[in-house]
Amino acid sequence: MFLDDGPDYDALSYAWGNDNQVCKIAIDGIEHLITKNLHDALQALVSGDQLVRLLWVDALSINQADMKERSRQV
């Protein structure tokens, strides 16, 4: 499988925000804690006329507590 064969998606990568200000979101029925800034960014990205939007968010897609995985992904 090649990247060109997969679905189109938008990527969001960032390292900002106050880790003490968190919000809960659910992805496939599983709760995740995210920073308020990420929550605000996600709301801005999915608002509007677009009913479905595929996003890849490094803060959610990469295990941030696993330094080996984080290093490999960077």
Image (cartoon, helix red, strand yellow):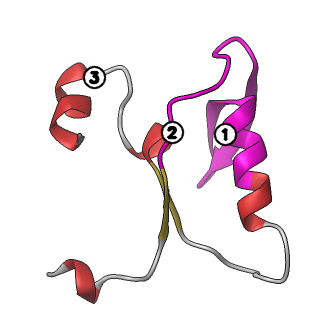
Front position among marks 3 and 2: 2
Residue behind mark 2: 14
Q: Are marks 3 and 1 in contact (CB under 8 Å)?
A: no
Per the rendered image, the range of residues in magenta is 13-42
Q: What percent of the width, then of the height, locates residue 40?
A: 78, 44
| 8 is higher (above) or lower (below) than 22 | below
Q: What element carries label 3?
A: loop
Left or right: 61 in relation to 74: right
Q: Are marks 3 and 2 in contact (CB under 8 Å)?
A: no
Front position among marks 1 and 2: 2
**Which amino acid lies under the numbered mark 1 shown in the image of this protein?**
Leu
Marked residue nearer the N-terminal end (3 or 2): 2
Q: How crowded is mark 2: few (under 14 residues within 10 Å), some or many (20 or more)?
A: few
Instruction: Please check the rendered image and state whether residue 24 is part of the magenta-colored stretch, yes or no.
Output: yes
**Which amino acid lies under the numbered mark 2 shown in the image of this protein?**
Tyr
The image's mark for residue 38 is 1
Distance from Cα at disc 1 to Cα at disc 2: 9 Å
Q: Looking at this view, is 28 or 50 the one in front?
A: 50
Q: What percent of the width, then of the height, locates residue 45?
A: 71, 62
Distance from Cα at disc 3 to Cα at disc 2: 17 Å
Marked residue nearer the N-terminal end (3 or 1): 1
Residue behind mark 3: 66
Q: Which residue is drawn at 55% across and 71% down?
A: 54
| 73 is higher (above) or lower (below) than 23 | below
Instruction: Please check the rendered image and state whether residue 20 is part of the magenta-colored stretch, yes or no.
Output: yes
Front position among marks 3 and 1: 1
